[in-house]
Image (spheres, helix red, strand yellow):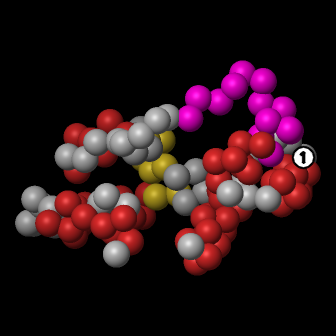
Amino acid sequence: HWIRESRLLPLSSGYLTVVDAGLVSTFVERWHRETNSFHFPFGEMTVTLDDVTTLLHISPNGNFFDAPVNMNTNNVARAAHEYLGATWEESLAEINFNKCAQYRLQWLRDLYSRLIQTN
């Protein structure tokens, strides 16, 4: 159900029939969850929407979020409230915890997990 709702169902019938275990292992070893990127001897690399479109043959759908230039505490808290479903209080608590107008990735993961469970 969730795969269909996410519009990723076509991936379940992917075109890749051979998986190179060594290649997958190398990517797993070089993945850094903290930065959502791969660290290679030549530098850091991340997966972009263009990579997803090219490799998986799925296109991004919907509108992109363009942040205002002036992202102060109130604007960041408002964005989390309006777009992510966080309460105003928990948004401000996270901003105060970080001592800047931003959110930790783990906080976003926890928020997303909670929203999935309640919906």
Where does the image place residue 100, in percent across and percent down from the top left? Answer: 85, 42
Quarter holding residue 46: top left
Q: Is residue 81 left or right of residue 3?
A: right
* Quadrant of the image containing the N terminus: bottom left
* Location of mark 1 (residue): 99
**Circle 1 SS class:** loop
Where does the image place residue 17, in percent across and percent down from the top left? Answer: 8, 66
* Quadrant of the image containing the C terminus: bottom right
Q: Relative to 4, does residue 58 appear above or below in the rendering?
A: above
- Which of the pair 4/39 is nearer the observer? 4
Q: Residue at x 37, y 61 (%)?
A: 6
Q: How many marks?
A: 1
Q: Is residue 15 left or right of residue 34?
A: left
Q: Residue at x 64, y 48 (%)?
A: 83
Quarter holding residue 70: top right
- Which of the pair 22/47 is nearer the observer? 47
Q: Mark 1 Cα within 10 Å, few/some/many (few <14, many 20+)?
A: few
Q: Relative to 4, does residue 69 appear above or below in the rendering?
A: above
Where does the image place residue 24, in percent across and percent down from the top left? Answer: 28, 64
Quarter holding residue 22: bottom left
Q: Residue at x 64, y 72 (%)?
A: 114
Q: Which residues are magenta?
A: 65-77
Residue 55 seen in render: no
Residue 78 seen in render: yes
Residue 19: say if magenta.
no
Main secondary structure type of the part rendered in magenta: loop
**Amino acid residing under circle 1:** Lys
Q: Relative to 46, does residue 5 appear above or below in the rendering?
A: below
Where does the image place residue 116, in percent across and percent down from the top left? Answer: 56, 71
Q: Is residue 80 left or right of residue 63?
A: right
Q: Residue at x 56, y 35 (%)?
A: 65
- Which of the pair 94/20 is nearer the observer? 94
